[in-house]
Image (tube, rainbow, N blue to C red):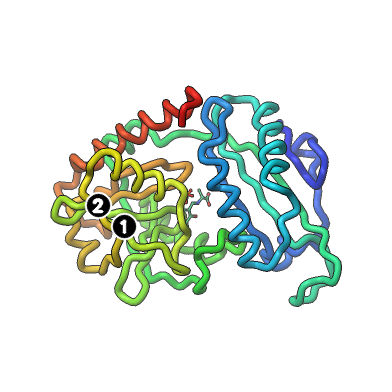
């Protein structure tokens, strides 16, 4: 039974309870982060806490803690966790109040931190890639906010499960936005390309890592809008996220991507990512 943090207390998960009047429960009125932890070191913690601040600003909720306080709480949860590697989930909601859409007058936010086991993608999914489907991106226009209101993402992700696939790639107005729970890259004419950050996608921490590694590794790369036709013609398609790291999409809507196997650029990036992770584990990242 993991130890979690809830509103000032560290306690066993089964003893952690919140009010049914919590606005996170009633309205999905909250934001969250998922922070990978390797060898008890939080990966890109500052960047995750900066994005948390941006999400809180986006929903007009004051940050209950300073970055140092967050680092202390997360550090304690990681120390108490059973395994060295964790996916630390944290969420802040606008707290309990009468059921009224408008903000309550006095806000007592609910803060919850949960360590989850972090299972890296299987060697088989790295070696063979994964299958994905496409769908129209029917989410709101502030997908840059990492909101707990995830119903559209839940339905879009389930769409891929129903098709026996691992992810749904989202298209809005003929352009690729991201995955239901990941960011997407393509390789076109030997050049790694990703959609630019905007209100229509989550600015992924892994997305930034991959672009940095591309820069360091001398991969030709650029950030530009990617049309549906370009996505379907791409030699390689990758997805990135804190829990999936970087994976090749080798089948899209039942059609092979490129040669239907993870491509050469993917193999280079995957190995650069693993090297970088090991550097972080040794405390040099
Ligand atoms: N999701 N886009 C969406 C919609 C996401 O939900 C995620 C990650 C990403 C990738 O962001 P990052 O590289 O910072 O993990 C992009 C997390 C893992 C989740 O909801 O569980």
First in sequence: mark 2 or mark 1? 1
Q: Nearer the viewer, residue 208 or 180?
A: 208
Q: Nearer the viewer, residue 38 or 24?
A: 38
Q: Is residue 200 visible?
A: yes
Q: Foreground mark, 2 or 1? A: 2
Query: Is label 2 in a helix, a strand or a loop?
Result: strand
Q: Residue at x 60, y 48 (%)?
A: 49
Which class describes the residues within 10 Å of circle 2: few (<14), some (14-19), or many (20+)? Answer: some
Q: Report which quarter residue 20 is drawn in.
A: bottom right
Q: Is ligand 1 within 8 Å of the beta carbon of the residue shown at mark 2? A: no
Above or below 73: residue 26: below
Query: Is label 1 in a helix, a strand or a loop?
Result: strand
Tag 2 and tag 1, C-beta contact below 8 Å: yes
Q: Is residue 257 visible?
A: no
Query: What percent of the width, then of the height, locates residue 248?
Result: 29, 45
Instruction: Kindly identify which residue carries mark 2.
Output: 221
Q: Residue at x 67, y 27 (%)?
A: 79
Query: What percent of the width, then of the height, locates residue 63?
Result: 71, 56
Above or below 263: residue 19: below
| Left or right: 84, with 248 as reference point | right
Query: What percent of the width, then of the height, locates residue 25?
Result: 72, 61
Mark 2 vs mark 1, CA separation in Å: 8 Å
Q: Nearer the viewer, residue 101 or 165?
A: 101
Instruction: Kindly identify which residue carries mark 1.
Output: 194
Quadrant for the N terminus, please: top right
Q: Residue at x 31, y 36 (%)?
A: 270
């Amino acid at each position: 039974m993991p130890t979690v943090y809830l509103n000032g207390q560290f306690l066993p998960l089964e003893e952690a309870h919140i009010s049914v009047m919590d606005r996170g429960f009633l309205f999905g009125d909250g934001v969250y982060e998922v922070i990978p932890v390797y060898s008890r070191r939080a990966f890109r913690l500052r960047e995750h806490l900066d994005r948390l601040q941006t999400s809180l600003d986006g929903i007009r909720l004051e940050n209950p803690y300073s970055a140092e306080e967050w680092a202390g709480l997360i550090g304690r949860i990681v120390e108490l966790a059973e395994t060295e590697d964790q996916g630390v989930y944290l969420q802040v909601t606008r707290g309990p109040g009468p059921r009224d859409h408008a903000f309550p007058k006095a806000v007592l936010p609910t803060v919850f931190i949960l360590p989850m086991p972090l299972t890296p993608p299987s060697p088989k999914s790295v070696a063979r890639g994964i299958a994905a489907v496409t769908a129209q991106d029917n989410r709101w226009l502030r997908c840059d906010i990492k909101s707990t209101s995830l119903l559209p993402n839940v339905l879009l992700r389930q769409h891929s499960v129903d098709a026996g696939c691992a992810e749904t790639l989202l298209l809005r107005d003929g352009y690729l936005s991201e995955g239901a729970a990941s960011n997407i890259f393509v390789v076109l004419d030997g050049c790694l390309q990703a959609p630019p950050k905007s209100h229509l996608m989550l600015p992924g921490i892994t997305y930034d890592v991959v672009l940095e590694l591309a820069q360091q590794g001398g991969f030709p790369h650029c950030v530009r809008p990617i049309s549906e036709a370009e996505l379907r013609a791409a030699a390689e398609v990758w997805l990135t996220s804190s829990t999936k790291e970087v994976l090749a999409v080798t089948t899209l809507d039942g059609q092979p991507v490129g040669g239907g196997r993870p491509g050469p650029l993917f193999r280079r990036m995957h190995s650069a990512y693993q090297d970088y992770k090991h550097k972080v584990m040794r405390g040099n990242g």
